[in-house]
Amino acid sequence: MSRTLQVLQAEIHVCRKCEIAGYIPEARPLTAGSQSARFMVIGQAPSRTDHLSGQFFVGPAGRRLREWFLEAGFAPEDFGSVIYSAAITKCFPGRVSGSSKDRAPSRAEQNLCRPWLDAEMAAVDPRVVVLFGGLAIGTFLSKRSLAELIGQTFEREGRLWIPLPHSSGASTWLNAAAHKTLLADAIVQLKTVRLEVTGQ
Ligand code: SF4
């Protein structure tokens, strides 16, 4: 890992901006990945399981995302080396009041955290960005409906962008048979791009 990314990740780990602003009770920022990663996954925010474990994508939704990557031919250990894990906000935002659902980070939290994500993107310079869920897709690609976007690969600013639906049980989008077909198409796209980028 280059010093530049090491320094950046160290700065991120001590960030307490959202805690100080009173948006979250405890800031515990996550970063995960190496300078050489050719792929970056951007989710919404760490889950409670991620927050407690200190690892990205280890809750139920994250494990499902990892399964999709395995279906596309990645190895489990590619997370961290080939795949850089990131999120629109790097700390667990807490739950929706009175619910077991994770709260989506507010616009103010997104704005506070965005410079970190932009800096990671600049430092890693991934060839492929996988946008995991509506918030990441809407932020970086388009606010069109998922049905219009999932299953396609987009080329912009020298990168390939692949949108994936969120795999949280709170999302019903994947319940529709037609949407499952779009997800299967997206995994094929991811596999094709992996072969192009890694050559294996
Ligand atoms: S979510 Fe981002 S900006 Fe907010 S405290 Fe965590 S790292 Fe800092």
Image (cartoon, rainbow, N blue to C red):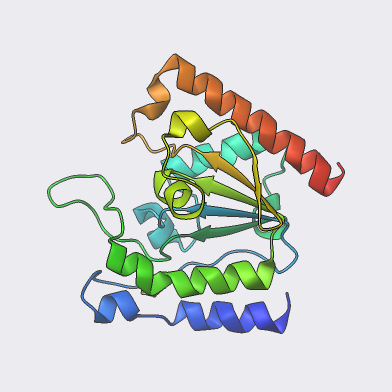
Identified at 71% across, 60% down, the residue is: 37
Marks counted in the figure total 0
Q: Examine the rendered structure and indicate whether residue 111 appears above or below residue 3.
A: above
Q: Is residue 29 left or right of residue 25?
A: right
Q: In the rendered image, is residue 94 in sight? A: yes
Quarter of the figure with the N terminus: bottom right
Q: Is residue 99 left or right of residue 192?
A: left
Specify the farthest residue to the right: 199
Point out the image quarter for the C terminus: top right
Residue 18 or 122: which is nearer the viewer? 122
Task: Measuring from the top left, give residue 132's x and y in whole percent.
Answer: 50, 45
Ligand 1 position by quadrant: bottom left
Q: Position of residue 178 (x, y in %)?
A: 47, 17
Where is residue 197 drawn, in percent x and y?
80, 48
Q: Residue furthest top?
A: 177
Q: Is residue 188 above or below residue 65?
A: above
- Relative height, residue 117 to residue 174 (above, below): below
Residue drawn at x 72%, y 35% as measured from the top left: 191
* Residue in the foreground of this view, choosing between 90 and 173: 173
In this rendering, the answer to whether 68 lies above or below 131 is above
Left or right, 76 with respect to 118, comes to: right
Q: Is residue 72 visible?
A: no
Residue drawn at (41%, 57%), measured in percent from left and top? 46
